[in-house]
Amino acid sequence: GHPVYRDMPTTIFEKMSARARETGAINLGQGFPEGPGPRDVLQAAAAALLNQSSQYPPMPGLIELRTALAGHYARHQGLNLSPQDIIVTSGATEALSASLLALVRPGDEVLMLAPLYDAYVPLVERAGGIPKIVTLTAPEWHITRAALEAAITPRTRILLINNPVNPTGVVMRPTELALLADLCVAHDLTAICDEVWEETVYDGQPHRPLIGFPGMRDRTVKIGSAGKIFSVTGWKVGWMCAAPALATLLARAHQYLTFTTPPNLQWAVAEGLGWPDDWLVDQRATYQASRDRLAAGLEKAGYAVLSSGATWFLSIDLPASGIALDDVSFCERLIDEAGVAAIPLSAFYPTDPATHLVRLCFAKTDATLDRAIERLAAFR
Ligand code: PMP
Ligand code: GLN
């Protein structure tokens, strides 16, 4: 029957974090950086709280923030967005909800790629959409035309993707993005592209926004999050970017969901986006070093680590590590017996889960990573 929230479980992120809080385990499960976030952006938020209005900001967001975002995307991704194309939301989560509520009509099929972020399927279903899922395979997670075309029907209206990808750390290849763009144009699909990990891409790779591909400017919703860019996941400042016809529809949904987002946080994000970009380069280098530290430590301890080119996550392959447990059992035992919280990748598959991979968050201090590595080494 029609899916209802009563039948949905508590998310794996909350479950694992709650258990980590109760037991004092090192939490490499839910994705959040260990530090407080850049001092300057915290100070900007504090100053704005004291010096700016705390009353409702404009429904689409402060013009200062929308202008700063347009500038950021022009400099970093070569995009030509106007502030009017951008709507500020309460986190990327609200942007996803608003996009789906605005664009999905009951019975529309929404094409997605698994593994996928856990919010997608419940949101699509509650919007009345029908999930059509193409499952990708480790370790390359290649996207192929044949698999996508097999899943597209005359009722397919939306492509919902996440790039770079949580949980795999995949940065979609230019050929794959071109293929997705091609299919959207050929089948008249609207793309919702969740790009919250756009500033956590490593090894000198660029981020390539789907909205910049031929034919996509007027049919793409690009979603971002300050929580990820500024390493402040609790802030819940996000946004959606789209051409005027789409943006008008998105604003309709946003006005009835949250209407606005706390103004002091919007001011702080606007200020931070205006800084010279060196700090973002430094932040990327720091996360990349953390990724390499955790990967090297785990490999030394005998774990098989999948390569990750982005996000705050890497995965270990259990059978390739000589471990005979499935991902859920491994995570259960790891938190109880070793005091480390992790996330089983099967949580990212609505159907046909891969059960041999476990996600670990590396956005932690060296000391925390080293303690976690010690515990993981002793556990096996
Ligand atoms: N999409 C993806 C792929 C994510 O990883 C996250 C955060 N974990 C979100 C959306 C939600 O972002 P926010 O916290 O800004 O709502
Ligand atoms: N995006 C975070 C992750 O993947 C979790 C967000 C949440 O707790 N819902 O770990």
Image: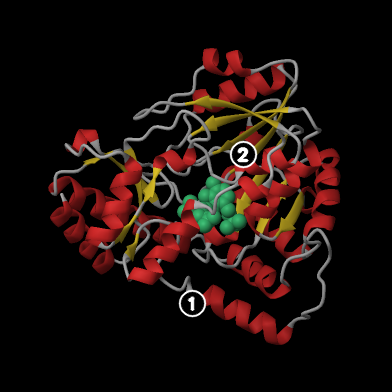
On the question of residue 367 being in view, the answer is yes
Residue 373 falls left or right of residue 58: left
Name the secondary structure under disc 2: helix
Q: Nearer the viewer, residue 332 or 138?
A: 332
Residue 8 at x, y percent in the picture: 60, 47
Residue 38 at x, y percent in the picture: 48, 72
Residue at horizontal 16 percent and vertical 36 percent from the top: 322
Figure quadrant of residue 310: top left
Q: Is residue 288 above or below residue 272?
A: above
Residue 27 at x, y percent in the picture: 36, 62
Residue at horizontal 25 percent and vertical 40 percent from the top: 325
Residue at horizontal 64 percent and vertical 83 percent from the top: 47
Residue at horizontal 77 percent and vertical 28 percent from the top: 107
> How many marks can you see?
2
Sooner in the amino-acid sequence: mark 2 or mark 1: 1
Mark 2 or 1: the one toward you: 2
**Residue that sits furthest to the bottom in the current view:** 50
Task: Name the residue tied to disc 1.
Answer: 39
Task: Name the residue tied to disc 2.
Answer: 121
Name the secondary structure under disc 1: helix
Q: Nearer the viewer, residue 99 or 17?
A: 17
On the question of residue 205 being in view, the answer is no
